[in-house]
Structures are given as structure tokens and as C-alpha cells.
Image (cartoon, rainbow, N blue to C red):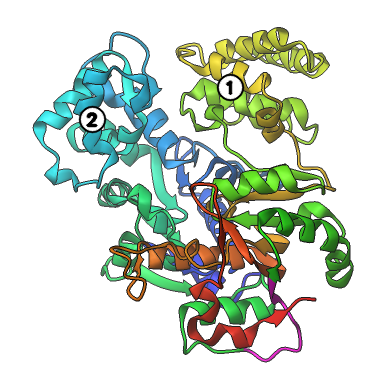
Amino acid sequence: MEPTEIQKKIIEYRGNVVVLASPGSGKTFVLSEKIRRVLSDDSLLSYQGVIAISYTRKASANLKRRTIGNGMPTKNSFFGTIDNFCLTQIVIYYGHYVFGRPNKEVEVVGLDEINEQERKCFEWITKQHPNYNEIEDAQIKDLQKLFLKGYVLVDSLELLALHIIKNSSACRHYFQARFKYIFIDEYQDADTYTNELFLSFVELGMTGVAVGDENQSIFGFANKSSIYLMSLKDREDFMMFPLRDNFRCSTPIINYSNRLLDSKSTVYETNQDGVYLIRVNGSEKQISSFIDNSIGEIKAKLGVDENKEIAILVKNERTQKILDESLSTPHRLVRTTKLDLDLNPRSRLFALLLRFYFDDRIPFLGVLDEYVDYDMLSAFTKQRLHHESKMIKSIPDENIDELINHFKTIADIILPKMQDGSSITRLKNVLSNNKELESYMPILSDEIQLMTLHKSKGLEFDVVFHLNMCEWELPVKRVENNDFDHPLYLNWEQDLKLHYVGITRARKACFLVRGTKRTNSQNILKKAMDSEFLRLNGVHTLRKKFY
């Protein structure tokens, strides 16, 4: 693939960069090519590399795979999520420089895993994040006490990393010597600590590259905001590049999604149809029947070969549950297990090994590459690991205990200093739950993918069914004192961006769907009307009815 002129400028620019990238604009291509350019630079020493942070493990794995293709070495680079970076690169190795040595190997826990008294001390962490300079000494002391016991809260990882960098010269010197660039994708999902960490590394001399889209900022409930992305473009030490051309979506989808956000956006000429409105007589169950009955026709009309290129996107887990139970068409519920959510390196390894176990396309070396430099391992260790990989592949599904033992053996070899914590328990829970276990198996060609709108971010499909397009649900609104003439929209901007994300997941066609009835939060059927978003900025002129 040859880069466009603007993509080429971004790849070749050597200074600090903020890239405002629209959906389908090729940002992953640009990121991977820019990293490849840096890693191929002869001035980079053998022990030096880059920090490349993505929002999800899947996105990180994809970026790393595209970067190291064609034999490109990653040298001593880091690819992963921000939480994993903070834990494995900073807190574990440099925490004791600032807080003292913990009583045991550090383990990541959630608020629900510590005692009630300690929990009360940390309620502030889950609320609005204050700037680092606003953190009280007593709050840092509480985090220190927990660290000395061998625990760090998952919600505190970025704050701890930031505190360590600011207070450990050894940590700062290490990063100055080791890494030359820091790349952060999906920067619109940064919080105040992500932003302060990023700028701290820039101040240490690293070149900073931030990529994001202010229109895809959909995690405001988790203290994430696009204000940090937009603040970078106003800095004198950053060059801003717009990456706006959408190469993924059909022209009708581009027209519709742009007009949704901007009433004055350009409408490009096209003789194609791509956005449809479907009103189904009934509730979510009848919507399931409609999808079952229309899949064949839609695939034929749009030239879609496999069901896995079709996604059903929903606003909430309530709708997701009804669809999961009602759909007759084979489908895969895309979910996140507690094993996936656990930041313990052993949990991450077990999740990778499960995917390796079920998917013959995943190489064992790809699993190891997340943790160790394979070339540096002894011949004996290599032999042991490959023996274990062959044993894993030969174990029948029902032999859960045997599979766990081999997983643990591999963990003991490559992560000898890490404790299991709750990793084994969470692995057992997955292996004993067929629905959760399904999450680690490759999507079958005949399976439609069912997920929430939040889950869909970063993904793409030929066809998208975008549900919950009814009043009260998208956007969410409430009424106080029976004043129906003046409803309160709780998260209008966030809901609009979520809607935008849903539409732009589709390459060929997006079907906006609502029933004449909807199931509310009390599981009561209510009359359903068109979402306010269906009337916004004249978008009704840019879609078709589907018969």
C-alpha cells in the first residue's frame, strides 16, 4: 500500500506530532509505517526502541503484527495497553525506589478485592480524576501502604506510574536511555494521568506521537476526554496533521456520518445506497426475527459472502441479552471475561494461551513474544517451552486440570517472579463456562457478531445493524416532575459520538433499526418512537427505507 501525500508527511516528520484521524483514514497503517521508519534508523542503538500504546490488547497486537512484518525487528520496544505499560515497565521495576520494597511480588487487584476499610480510603480513585498536583499526600500514603503489602489497585496504575517517574531519577534515566519515541493511539480516550505521563516522557526527550479522533470520544463515564487530544494541537512543540479521508466506508455512510455531526458538511455525489432505516412492528424479539429472515437477501444484495462480516450493535447489555436468546441465525456474543480484564501478567499469558489452544493460526512464538526475547533464551528453555506447546495442542477440551497444569508450567518458565494471584481461579472459571470459553475461539464464517456499541470501537464490518434507535434509549433522556416538554438529555454529546462510532463501523451498509416497542430498564415493554438522532441535521434525506 502506497501512502497518500498527507500520510507520507506524517510518516516522515521527525518532531512531536498530533494526528486527528477520522474513521477509516488509515491511522494504523500510518502508525505502523512510522514505527518501522524509526526502528530502521541506523542511529537507534541496539538496546533502544519505542513505546507504542494502544487502547485495547487486540489493537496493540494488530499494530505490533503490522509493524514487525517482513522481518522488521522491534528491538527493545514495548507494544501494549497503557495499564500494562504502567504495571510492567514502571510500577513493578521502579515502585520500590519510591515506596520501599513490598512484602511480596506485586499483584494487581480491584477495589472489590480489598477489605472494606481500605476500600473506603480509595473511593476517590473511581471518581473524577484530579490533576497530579492536586493529589493529597495522604492519598499517596494510602497507595504506598497498599503497595508495601504487595498490591496495587488497577484504577491507580497510571497515577502510581506518574508519581514514580516524577520521584525516581533512576526511572527517568532508564527511559531516557531506552526509548526514543512514544506513540499513543486513540488519544481521545486519554484521561488526565495518561496525558501527564505522555508529556512527562516528551519532557524527558522522547518524540511524542498522539493519534485520535475527537468525534470518537465515548468513554466520558470513565473520566476519558478528547480535551487532552485537542490541547496538544495548540502546543507550539507539536505539529498537527489532519487525517480525514475515509477509505473504509461507502460514500453514503461517509455523507450520513459527517452530516450527523455537522449540518454544513459536504455531501458527496453518489448513486449508491448505504444507510437504511428499518422500523419493525414489535419489540427486540421481532427485530431478531427480521434479521433472521432478511440476512440472505441482504448478503445477496450487497455481495457479502460470510456472516462474520455482519455485526449487530446494541446500546446496552439488556438488548444484547434479548438478541442473544432470540436470534436463530448462528452468532457470536462478543464479551470480555474477568480473565481478560485481569492485568496480572499471568492472566494475560493464560488468555493468550487459550487463543493459541483454539486457533491454529496463532504461532506459539507470537505468544512468547509478548513476554520474552526468544533469541536470548537458552536451548534448554526453548526445548521445554516447545514441548509444553505441543502438549497443550494434544490435550482434549474436557481435560481442564491437565490444560491448566501446562499453562502454569509455561508461566513458571517465563514469569518466574510473578504470583498467580487470582489468575488460576479466573482461568478455571473460563474453562468451565462454555459461553465465556467461546470468546477465545476464532469467529466462524457463519456467525454474526453481536456486541455493544462501546465494544465495536476500532472494528469494521461489511454490514452493521445498529439497534436501539428509539426515543429514551439513544440519546438517553429523563423527565423530572412530569415535565415532558423539557426532557433532560443526560449525555447528548457522548451518545451522539457513540451513534457516530456505530455507523462508521460499516463498510458497505448500515441498517438503523427500531421496533414499535422497546424493553426498558425494568424489563417492561413500552411504546417506541424514533430517536432524536434520526431527525438531526436533516440526515433523513441521506438514508433510504429498506423493504
Residue 277: say if magenta.
yes
**Mark 2 and mark 1: Cα distance apart in space:** 41 Å
Secondary structure under tag 1 reads helix
Question: Where 57 falls versus 280 (above or below)?
Answer: above
Q: Residue at x 45, y 63 (%)?
A: 495
How would you classify the magenta stretch by its main secondary structure?
Answer: loop
Task: Look at the image and give the residue range highlighted in magenta.
Answer: 268-278
Q: Is residue 269 magenta?
A: yes
Question: In this view of the protein, which residue sits in the foreground, 419 or 164?
Answer: 419
Closer to the camera, 204 or 104? 104
Report which residue position mark 1 lands on: 376
Residue nearest the observer in this picture, 6 or 430? 430
**Residue 319 appears in the figure:** yes
Within 10 angstroms of label 2, few (less than 14), some, or many (20 or more) residues? some
Instruction: Say left or right for 96 vs 109.
Output: left
Which percent across, then down, holds residue 322?
65, 46
Which mark identifies residue 122? 2
